[in-house]
Image (cartoon, coloured by chain):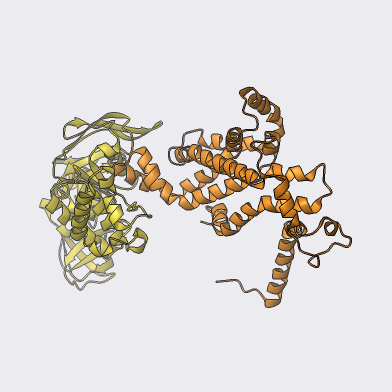
Amino acid sequence: MGRITLDKVRKAFGEVEVIPPLDLTIEDGEFVVFVGPSGCGKSTLLRLIAGLEDVTDGQIRIDGQDATRVPPAKRGLAMVFQSYALYPHMSVRKNIAFPLKMAGLPQAEQDKRVTNAASVLNLTDYLERRPGQLSGGQRQRVAIGRAIVREPAAFLFDEPLSNLDAALRVGMRLEISELHKRLETTMIYVTHDQVEAMTMADKIVVLRAGNIEQVGSPLELYKEPRNLFVAGFIGSPKMNLLDGDEAARRNAATIGVRPEHIVPSATEGPWQGTVGVSEHLGSDTFFHVHLDGRKEPITVRAGGEVDMHHGDRIFLTPDESRIHRFDAEGLRIP
Amino acid sequence: MARAVPTQRRITLSVVAWVIALLIFFPILWTILTSFKTEAEAVADPPLFLNFAWTLENYAVVQERSDYLRYLWNSIAIAGGSTLLGLIIAVPAAWSMAFVPGKRTKDILLWMLSTKMLPAVGVLYPIRLILINLGLLDTKFALIFILTLINLPIIVWMLYTYFREIPGEILEAARMDGATLWSEIAHVLTPMAVPGIASTVLLNIILAWNEAFWTLTLTTVDAAPLTAFIASYSSPEGLFYAKLSAASTMAIAPILIMGWFSQKQLVRGLTFGAVK
């Protein structure tokens, strides 16, 4: 079981309030991603749940029990750190067995669980090595191994993939998702990478300056961002935001349209402009288009290879049904 | 890229370095040589360097006249005891300063160091009187206690510097893994800080071993360590240079040998943090 409830949780460092009172419920077995730009308080929030930081006000409940003042060791949670935080003086085997040793499990049980975890994570051949002799990806797997042997109520991941190179990151992302499917344990995952958030999460919590901007499934956030911040943050490439005449015509202060909801054409369309930089990815082509009378370029996605180049005239047709409208406060107009 | 140093310059520098090193080491070398001379050869003019009749007589006399092993045991007990007691106090102190620093941590560290600036003689009489009243004068216990206090600031500072190099996340990981404060210190922090603790121990043993002011003023017979052993040969029979040298050699030999074997560790310990 791993249902975690935050009830008006607030955190201040001295005079500085980093997390204003905040409510959040994480259901048992859910994969929740905290996402937001650096300094938005996502890691602090995770550390509050872990017990590594003290809550200033409010209550944290784990499976209905008040855990606000419970020390980290007694919360039944396991954490994977960005820097892996392996014990450099211990072999992989001892690293993975450490939480079991601390829990006072019999040696035979420890060995059994370590062997299991090692085979799940492809670490069997490395059990006698020290962390210093492993690659980044292997170290991360050891850190995960150390977390899973405890059979915790929930896993906490603090930007676990940001020290890995791009290719490895994609692989580990899949492994973690796979692990979640198999264990069906609650996972809370902190990242600044919205692609990670979109691909892994059951539920995304978008944070800005300690405030929750929106909570929802990846597609809810994608389809109905509650405000301009979420609209700009979720989705890759970013949503195009336009104000002025185009917005006013649609009774909004700002409108947003995603690059994939604009159809480019060489001959016709309501918006006209000039092709700036174009990025050819093979499967897709992204054009940065300078619309006539606008400074900021907008991004347009075209499927496959499209024969248009820098300086060419281009016509764009936005999908009206998928235009997002926002009021002067930046809130979504339904 | 390594800087290219012309051969001639390198040779000159090597010679200069050797000359300076020998100059510094010379008094110790001379003491050791003199300890193998007769009293007459020891004061010969011009001085004899190697061409004298080597003898172990001084060592035999010194051992016969005063019980070297008893002094040695006292030195070991005092240096070892004060180091152990110092570590027991300093490891938790340095842990808290390094990992849960408060507003005044920096001030406390500086204040601790500033106690080393106080001339020891300034507190000699209060301490001596307290020990007399407690009946602790000339006991190993008192010396262990005093030397611990004298060297504690240095131990805390060195350990603090070491602990600061250990990433806090690793200790947090241990906490998440269910480690209590003591298992965290025993299973994670201490093993990771072994090189640092080892150099701290070595330096503290050397400092305590060589400590003369307190050991001479607070002991008479029972707890007297090797420093008192040397001193007993310097006066009023100051003219017996060969015997004094033999006594000195016997007193410094253990620490010299220990220092020789651990110099690598010691150098690494003292420069740790400065080069990383």
Q: Residue at x 72, y 54 (%)?
A: B59
Q: Residue at x 80, y 42 (%)?
A: B235
Is B274 on the left or on the right of A14, as rendered? right
Q: Residue at x 18, y 56 (%)?
A: A116
Q: Quadrant of residue A330?
A: top left
Residue B243 appears in view:
yes
Residue B269, position in %: x, y? 54, 53
Name the tint of chain B in the rendering.
orange
Residue A40 appears in view:
no
Of B31 and B53, nearer the camera is B53
* Chain letter of the yellow region: A
Of B106 and A145, nearer the camera is A145
Q: How many marks?
A: 0
Of A18 and A49, nearer the camera is A49
Of A56 and B94, nearer the camera is B94
Is A72 on the left or on the right of B217, as rendered? left
Is B146 on the left or on the right of A144, as rendered? right
Residue B48, position in %: x, y? 83, 64
Which quadrant holds the C terminus of chain A?
A: top left
Residue B161, placed above or below residue A261:
above
Residue extending furthest left? A321
Residue B275, position in %: x, y? 54, 57
Which quadrant holds the N terminus of chain A?
A: top left
